[in-house]
């Protein structure tokens, strides 16, 4: 549910704005309500793999219970089959892994701690391959005088992550051992200790703060942050505009 995004509030705000424009209540005035941010980062792509692990682990535990009715047990098994099928398909694209590793609270250490050793083979190679592909694809854009991202870290485009006790349980509770590193941006980034989650942490602001050290990873992180984890929000927005259009007519 947290990964669906929250468009209900913003849709209601937009509806009221258009309604007021039609009745000329705020015509010619700036509607500052629309300028307030109503989103958060939970529904971005980087949460997909940890959330899959979290849900699958609960289903695995539920499958072993003997005190449930046959109907509930069947539903649990069917849910596990479907979730596992989608989880396996996520390996077809490197983007899910890269987005998760670019979360400074997750990195590669999360996968090494929560996956079998054989499942971790080739992960670093995927990161390097994605960076090569990304760099090649962005070369032409870099040559077209694109303005660099803002140096300010005070932007509140996204609010902090939720403080729910179960959500984000995959974040580390203590700092990792810091290892000296050189070489590529991946080497330097992965060698540093993972960030400890706080209620005010923002994935986006963290990367903007560190853009001087990791210019390529920054661009990768911000691009992937724009990718929703699910299509639910997009479909809701599309359906919600029917409500607005009907009131225009």
Image (cartoon, rainbow, N blue to C red):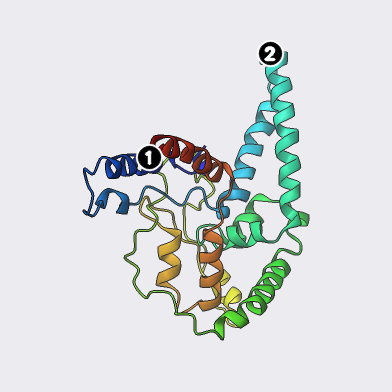
Position of 183 relative to 200 (above/below)? below
Residue 93: image quadrant is bottom right
The kind of secondary structure element at disc 2 is loop
Reading the image, the residue beneath label 1 is: 9
Mark 1 Cα-neighbour bin, 10 Å: few <14, some 14–19, many ≥20: few
* Image quadrant where residue 165 sits: top left
Residue drawn at 51 percent across, 78 percent down: 215
Q: Is residue 84 left or right of residue 11?
A: right
Q: Are marks 1 and 2 in contact (CB under 8 Å)?
A: no
Q: Which tag is nearer the camera, tag 1 or tag 2?
A: 1
**Nearer to the camera, 172 or 142:** 142
Total labels: the figure holds 2
Q: Which label number is shown at residue 69? A: 2
135 left or right, relative to 210: right
Q: Secondary structure at mark 1?
A: helix
Q: Earlier in the sequence, mark 1 or mark 2?
A: 1
Q: How far, Cα to Cα, is label 1 from label 2?
A: 38 Å
Q: Position of residue 2 (x, y in %)?
A: 49, 41
């Amino acid at each position: 549910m947290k990964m669906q995004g929250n468009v209900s509030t913003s849709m209601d705000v937009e509806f009221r704005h258009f309604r007021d424009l039609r009745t000329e209540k705020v015509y010619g005035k700036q509607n500052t309500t629309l300028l307030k941010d109503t989103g958060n980062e939970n529904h971005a792509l980087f949460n997909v793999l940890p959330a899959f692990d979290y849900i699958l682990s609960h289903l695995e535990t539920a499958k072993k219970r003997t005190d449930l009715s046959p109907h509930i047990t069947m539903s649990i098994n069917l849910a596990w089959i479907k979730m596992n099928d989608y989880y396996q398909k996520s390996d077809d694209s490197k983007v899910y892994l890269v987005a998760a590793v670019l979360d400074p609270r997750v990195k590669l250490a999360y996968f090494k701690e929560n996956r079998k050793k054989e499942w971790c083979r080739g992960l670093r190679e995927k990161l390097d391959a994605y960076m090569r592909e990304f760099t090649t694809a962005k070369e032409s854009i870099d040559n077209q005088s694109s303005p660099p991202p803002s140096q300010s870290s005070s932007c509140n485009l996204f609010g902090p992550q939720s403080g729910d006790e179960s959500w984000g349980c995959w974040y580390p509770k203590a700092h990792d051992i810091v290892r000296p590193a050189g070489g590529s941006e991946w080497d330097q980034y992965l060698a540093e200790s993972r960030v400890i989650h706080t209620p005010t942490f923002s994935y986006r602001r963290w990367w903007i703060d560190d853009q001087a050290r990791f210019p390529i990873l920054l661009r990768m992180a911000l691009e992937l942050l724009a990718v929703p984890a699910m299509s639910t929000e997009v479909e809701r927005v599309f359906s919600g505009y029917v409500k607005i259009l009907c009131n225009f007519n």
